[in-house]
Structure formats: structure tokens, C-alpha cells
Amino acid sequence: MPAPVPPPDPAAALPPDPDTALPPEAAADSAPEPKDSTPASAPYSPGARASSTPIRILLADDHALVRRGVRLILEREPDLRVVAEAGDGAEAIEAARGQDIDLAVLDIAMPRMTGLQATRALATLKPGLRILMLTMHDNEQYLFQALKAGAGGYVLKSVADRDLVAACRAAMRDEPFLYPGAVTALIRNYLDRVRHGEENADSLLTPREEEVLKLVAEGHSSKDIADILVISIKTVHRHRANLLQKLGLRDRLELTRYAIRAGLIEP
């Protein structure tokens, strides 16, 4: 017996309700909009420079294969560009003479002239140049020599893919970059010197140097400081030079920042 056919729905035969039916133009407006096929812009990178000019890098290592790998790590970043390469410290100095560079990334152990020797020469040749050591040596002696020579950071090759980009950006912000083992070495060295009486645990400065530092940070001229402390201008200049050397600073602005951190003046 055939299945019964359901009767037609009477509502289907009714004309559309004029109160609810949409006119053709409104119907078109209510249709879903096509998706924008334009790709979203890349997210902002906090490490990117405000300027569109990349950081110009000199890379020195006596192994071409290492230089190639380091270049690949750096040039994945839009704000970093290797503009010169060198196979030893002497070549690095020549490259720095001939090109405008912002940052030098140097290996330590190289023929003819080591990275440490090149660091000292570059710091004299181009005082504003930032310098990083990139080395396989997890060695306290090399670390201290590099910092003393003028390097602003010390990066191990074994973790270059993790640390090098951040170290480059830190250097350009005038911030030191050290791997955790290096920080531990510095603290241990300082504490050893304190125990042996080579450092004053409370202050690296003499009371007179603190007085000069405070006055410099407050904006007094050398003549004003000499009058206030009843010393010669020459003595003021000597104290100021000692302050810069002891604290590893370069100018009045950095002395002022140090004085604020030390609580000698209010920010």
C-alpha cells in the first residue's frame, strides 16, 4: 500500500507579508559581506627600532661557516643587517674604518689580532660603537678581559640562536647583556674582593667622590663645585675623571643616572 502523501502547507502558498518582507535592495544589504582576503599586518615587535633604518653590524669570526650561520640568525630580523664581515681582528678594524657601523660582533680567538685586541682598538677608534663578544669560551678570565676592553655584552655561541638578537638590541639601548653564568661570575668575583678587603661593600666611592658626584648630578659647574668644596678646579676635574673610570660611565648624564640610583639625589 503506498505511503500517504502529506497535504501541502497552506502557508507556503501565501504571498509574502509586506510588513516583514525585505525589498530587493535591503535583501542585498543584509547578505553576508565577503571576507577580506588581505592578510593582516604583522604584529608589532617590541624589539623593532622606532626608525626604519636597520642596525648596521660588523661581524668578525675566522670561520666562514660560523659567519654564515650568525648572519642567518641576525638577518631574520628586520632591524638587523650585517653590512661587513671580517676574518680576524685586523680586518675588523679596517672594515670599521671604511664603513658606517653601529655594532661590532666579534669572536675572541682569531688569528693576527684577537677579538679582545680589536675591541680595545675599536673603542678608541670609534667611541660610540657598541661591541659584543660572541665566543665559545665560557671562561671568567675572557669575560672580565672583554668587559674591561670595552665590550657591552658577552654571548656564547652555543646559545647564539637564543641570545644573540636580544644582545644586539640591548647593546643599542646601552644596556649590558650577559648570560646567566657570567652574572654569577661577576657577583662571585665582587664578593671575593670584598672578603679580601679589595672593595668596600657599602660603597665603591670615597666620601669626597660622593660629594663631587652629587654636585655634578645637581647640575653645578666645575667652578661651582670647587667653590662649594673649597678645592681647585683641577681637583674637581680629577675627581670627575676618577668617578667615570670607577663606575664605567662616560658622561654627566650617566653620572646623574647613577646618582639617582644610589639615592644621592631625587629623580
Image (spheres, grey):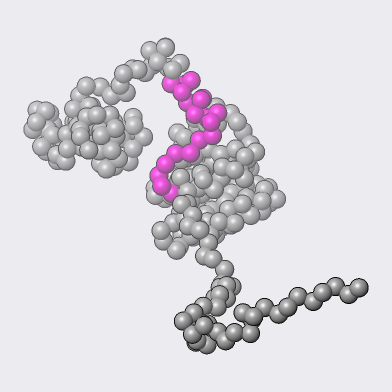
Q: Between residues 30 and 186, which one lies in front from this camera angle?
A: 30
The residue at the far front in this view is 1
What stretch of residues is rendered in magenta? 172-190
Asked if residue 185 lies in the magenta stretch, the reply is yes
Residue visible at 48% across and 20% down in the picture: 188
Residue visible at 28% across and 38% down in the picture: 257
Is 212 left, or right, of 36 in this rendering? left
Percent across and percent down for residue 263 are: 24, 29
Q: Between residues 94 and 131, which one lies in front from this camera angle?
A: 131
Percent across and percent down for residue 201 are: 35, 17
Is 170 left, or right, of 263 in this rendering? right
Q: Is residue 155 above or below residue 73?
A: above
Percent across and percent down for residue 128 are: 39, 49
Residue visible at 17% across and 37% down in the picture: 218
Position of the C terminus, as image quadrant, is: top left
The residue at the far top in this view is 196
Q: Between residues 60 and 66, which one lies in front from this camera angle?
A: 66
Q: Is residue 81 visible?
A: yes
Asked if residue 152 lies in the magenta stretch, the reply is no
Total numbered labels placed on residues in the image: 0
Position of the N terminus, as image quadrant, is: bottom right
Residue visible at 62% across and 79% down in the picture: 11
Q: Is residue 141 above or below residue 122?
A: above
Percent across and percent down for residue 157 are: 63, 40
Q: Quadrant of residue 160?
A: top right
Magenta part mainly helix, strand or loop?
Answer: helix
Q: Is residue 112 visible?
A: no
